């Protein structure tokens, strides 16, 4: 199974379109959203081509391929625009013997861990900074923001065959980690 992870689109039609192109190019099975899909939030500048209605339409076209959690900028009004659920604070995926704990990152993150077991994987967004590391017995991943990165460039994550890779839209690998315990960097 191949998964694409995005976070913090913040209503950017430009970067949502770029994300969909990568999703199709990578031939992913599911698109995982770590929240903050439509609204830019009061602390953020408007992202490139801010068009939440257009982003909602693009996402709805893939509604059967999206697994999403709620970001701190997502609301019930956003849910009314989207044809797939986004209001869960977190969810779990069980893939290749790994338990992935998916959340936005404003409650659970590397400094405030949820209850995790050995070799579990915490995946979150919110901070707009890429991260792929093993800390103690767990893996901590953040694909960064597709539209408003704070460090480096706009990026997303790809998971396949135990490998989590953070990539730019130009195909540059920002970070990679083998979830079997072997660092891919």
Image (tube, rainbow, N blue to C red):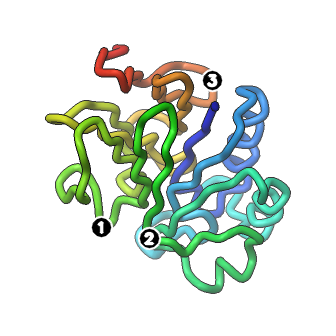
Q: Residue at x 23, y 58 (%)?
A: 115
Cα gap from disc 2 to disc 3, whole angstroms:
31 Å
Q: Residue 73's spot in the image, x, y percent?
A: 49, 73
Question: Contact, CB < 8 Å: mark 1 with mark 3?
Answer: no
Which residue matches tag 1? 107
Residue 117 is left or right of residue 46, and the answer is left
| SS at circle 2 | loop
Q: Residue at x 59, y 56 (%)?
A: 9
Q: Residue at x 75, y 42 (%)?
A: 20
Residue 23 is left or right of residue 10, and the answer is right
Upstream in sequence: badge 2 or badge 3: 2
Cα gap from disc 2 to disc 1, whole angstroms:
9 Å
Residue 51 is left or right of residue 159, and the answer is right
In front: mark 1 or mark 3? 1
Q: Quadrant of the N terminus?
A: top right
In depth, the one of 120 and 66 nearer the eye is 120
| SS at circle 3 | loop
- Residue 29 position by quadrant: top right
Question: Contact, CB < 8 Å: mark 2 with mark 1?
Answer: yes
Q: Quadrant of the C terminus?
A: top left
Q: Residue 140's spot in the image, x, y percent?
A: 30, 40
Which residue matches tag 3? 170
Upstream in sequence: badge 2 or badge 1: 2
Which residue matches tag 2? 89
Upstream in sequence: badge 1 or badge 3: 1
């Amino acid at each position: 199974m191949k998964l694409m992870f995005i976070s913090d689109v913040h209503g950017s039609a430009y970067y949502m379109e770029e994300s969909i192109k990568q999703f199709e190019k990578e031939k992913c099975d599911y698109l995982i959203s770590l929240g903050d899909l439509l609204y830019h939030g009061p602390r953020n500048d408007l992202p490139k081509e801010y068009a939440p209605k257009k982003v909602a339409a693009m996402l709805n076209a893939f509604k059967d391929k999206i697994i999403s959690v709620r970001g701190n900028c997502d609301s019930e009004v956003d849910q009314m625009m989207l044809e797939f659920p986004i209001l869960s604070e977190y969810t779990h995926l069980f893939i290749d013997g790994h338990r992935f704990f998916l959340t936005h990152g404003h409650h659970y993150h590397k400094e405030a861990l949820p209850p995790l077991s050995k070799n579990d994987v915490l995946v979150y967004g919110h901070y707009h900074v890429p991260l792929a590391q093993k800390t103690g017995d767990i893996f901590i991943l953040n694909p960064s923001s597709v539209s408003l990165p704070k460090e480096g460039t706009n990026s997303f994550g790809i998971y396949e065959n135990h490998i989590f890779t953070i990539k730019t839209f130009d195909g540059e690998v920002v970070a990679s980690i083998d979830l079997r315990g072997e660092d891919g960097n």
